């Protein structure tokens, strides 16, 4: 008798829990704050904002944090100025060249080929035409130009500005200039060493060798 009573209590409780549920309407919210944020929704409409619009356009003349404006325009003039003026700010080290090679292989080799000879896989499969060799004399490719075409693209070549960072584009540029040099049969460019990169270290070394030269010529010669 006792267990029958207990069972029926359970039954009524369970029934009351499901009976109020209407699948065509939203259910009760026990803790609405967990579902509905206290802060404003990014694209919500609220009276406190002008036009009720939470999402705002950036103030004119401002730039996103971490973004740097690129000074050269996307026209033949901008291209030729970038080609002559713009220089790679990254040191030419083995590490940078290897990083550039990896990125080049991902983004550029499909068209330009692993050697930069314009015979990438897409060219071999006749999916695209008109890919230049990097040693094309008529183009006289420079590092500024390589950066510029990655930034804006050039005719059939798309822009890589959204896939790559400023640094990555310069890393790729180092590698493209190496490929160009190899195609032209130029002498291997020497890597910059730590001493080249930190002038202070260099200056210290020179000071040292000057000091030793006062104590004795031979010692100085050994150092050199
Ligand atoms: C979809 C194929 C394609 C890919 C991928 C591609 N390019 Fe190109 N690239 C071209 C074509 C086509 C041209 C010739 C454009 C023209 O002059 O009309 C070109 C031209 C160039 C030039 C010559 C610019 C000059 O000074 O005349 C450089 C340098 C270059 N690309 C670098 C790159 C780099 C670096 C990448 C990778 C980030 C890349 N390309 C990826 C198709 C491609």
Image (cartoon, grey):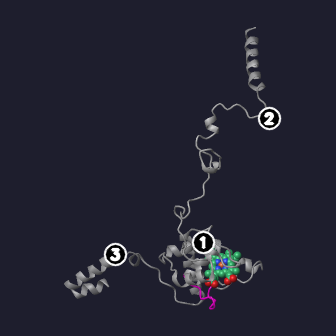
**Mark 1 residue CB less than 8 A from any atom of ligand 1:** yes
Expressed as whole percent of the image width and height from the top left, the position of residue 88 reads: 51, 78
N-terminal of the pair, mark 2 or mark 3, is: 2
Disc 3 versus disc 1: distance between alpha carbons?
A: 31 Å
Quick one: label 1, few (<14), some, or many (20+) residues within 10 Å? some
Label disc, if present, on residue 24 of the rendered structure: 2
N-terminal of the pair, mark 1 or mark 2, is: 2
Task: Tell me the SS state at disc 1.
Answer: helix
Q: Regarding ligand 1, which quadrant of the image does it lie in?
A: bottom right
Q: 177 left or right of 216?
A: right
- Which residue is at 78% across, 25% downward? 19
Quick one: label 2, few (<14), some, or many (20+) residues within 10 Å? few
Expressed as whole percent of the image width and height from the top left, the position of residue 125 reads: 77, 78
The residue beneath circle 1 is 103
Q: Nearer the viewer, residue 23 or 209?
A: 23
Expressed as whole percent of the image width and height from the top left, the position of residue 99 reads: 55, 72
Magenta portion: prevailing SS class: loop
Q: Which residues are magenta?
A: 134-143
Q: 92 left or right of 154?
A: left
- Which residue is at 77% across, 22% downward? 15
The residue beneath circle 3 is 201
Expressed as whole percent of the image width and height from the top left, the position of residue 119 reads: 70, 82
Q: 103 left or right of 85?
A: right
- Which residue is at 57% across, 68% downward? 165
Residue 65 position (above or below residue 115)? above
Res. 183 in view = yes
In the image, which is nearer the foreground, mark 2 or mark 3?
2
Residue 59 painted magenta: no
Residue 65 position (above or below residue 52)? below
């Amino acid at each position: 008798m006792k267990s029958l009573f207990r069972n029926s209590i359970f039954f009524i409780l369970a029934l009351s829990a499901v009976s109020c549920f209407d699948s065509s309407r939203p259910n009760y919210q026990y803790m609405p704050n967990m579902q509905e944020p206290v802060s404003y929704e990014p694209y919500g409409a609220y009276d406190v904002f002008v036009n009720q619009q939470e999402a705002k356009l950036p103030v004119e003349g401002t730039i996103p944090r971490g973004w740097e404006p690129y000074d050269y325009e996307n026209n033949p003039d901008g291209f030729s100025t970038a080609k002559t003026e713009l220089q790679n700010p990254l040191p030419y080290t083995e590490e940078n060249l290897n990083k550039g090679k990896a990125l080049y292989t991902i983004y550029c080799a499909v068209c330009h080929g692993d050697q930069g000879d314009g015979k990438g896989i897409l060219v071999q499969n006749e999916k695209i035409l008109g890919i230049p060799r990097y040693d094309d004399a008529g183009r006289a490719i420079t590092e500024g130009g390589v950066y510029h075409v990655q930034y804006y693209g050039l005719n059939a070549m798309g822009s890589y500005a959204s896939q790559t960072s400023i640094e990555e584009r310069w890393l790729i540029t180092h590698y493209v200039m190496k490929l160009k040099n190899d195609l032209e049969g130029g002498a291997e460019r020497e890597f910059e060493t730590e001493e080249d990169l930190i002038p202070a270290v260099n200056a210290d070394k020179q000071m040292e060798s000057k000091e030793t030269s006062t104590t004795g010529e031979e010692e100085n010669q050994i150092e050199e």
